[in-house]
Image (tube, grey):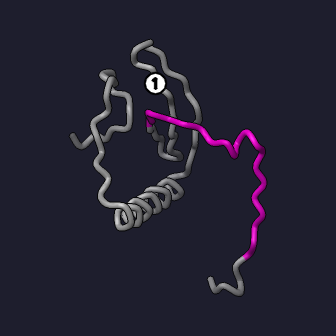
Amino acid sequence: MSEKNQQQIQIKAQDDVLKGNYANAVQTTHTQEEFVLDFMNIFSWQKLGVLSSRVILSPGHMKRLVTSLAANIKKYEEQFGEIQAQPSQGFDQGFGFQTDDK
């Protein structure tokens, strides 16, 4: 689509949404129709977790999100250096930001 044909969309957000949510763990699940990202705060020393946000995406949106995240990580590392991902600490129950390719 050319720049002349691009439509401007004004996005409104309430103050409580603008502050954002912190997460130190995420659980990703899917069905044929959607991906569900549950962002959580896990307090391992208390054996307690709190769901801070749930994001539900179509498979097409999920693939575009993954592509966008990969592109942004590449740009970040070009500017600031390689990110040294440390293993999740204190999450012995399969929680935390983990992948299946161990």
Q: Position of residue 53 (x, y in %)?
A: 59, 35
Does 31 sit above or below residue 11? Answer: above
**What segment is highlighted magenta in the picture?**
7-27
Say which of 95 and 45 sits in front. Answer: 45
Check disc 1 and report its element: helix, strand or loop: strand
Q: Residues within 10 Å of mark 1 (few under 14, many from 20)?
A: many
Quadrant where the N terminus is found in the figure: bottom right
* Left or right: residue 10 compared with residue 69: right
- Is 12 covered by the magenta stretch? yes
- Residue at the (76%, 49%) spot, across then down: 13
Q: Position of residue 29 (x, y in %)?
A: 45, 37
View extreme (top): residue: 46
Does 18 sit above or below residue 88? Answer: below
View extreme (front): residue: 80
* Left or right: residue 10 compared with residue 67: right
Quadrant where the C terminus is found in the figure: top left
- Residue at the (69%, 46%) spot, across then down: 18
Q: In this figure, which residue is indicated by the disc labeled 1?
A: 42
Q: Which image quarter: residue 5?
A: bottom right
Does 95 sit above or below residue 82? Answer: above
- Residue at the (55%, 51%) spot, across then down: 58
Q: Amino acid at mark 1?
A: Ile
* Left or right: residue 1 compared with residue 75: right
* Left or right: residue 99 compared with residue 34: left
Q: Position of residue 99 (x, y in %)?
A: 31, 41
- Residue at the (51%, 58%) spot, across then down: 60
Say which of 62 and 96 sits in front. Answer: 96
Q: Which image quarter: residue 69?
A: bottom left
Say which of 29 and 48 sits in front. Answer: 48
Q: Position of residue 74 (x, y in %)?
A: 37, 64
SS assignment for the magenta stretch, majority: loop
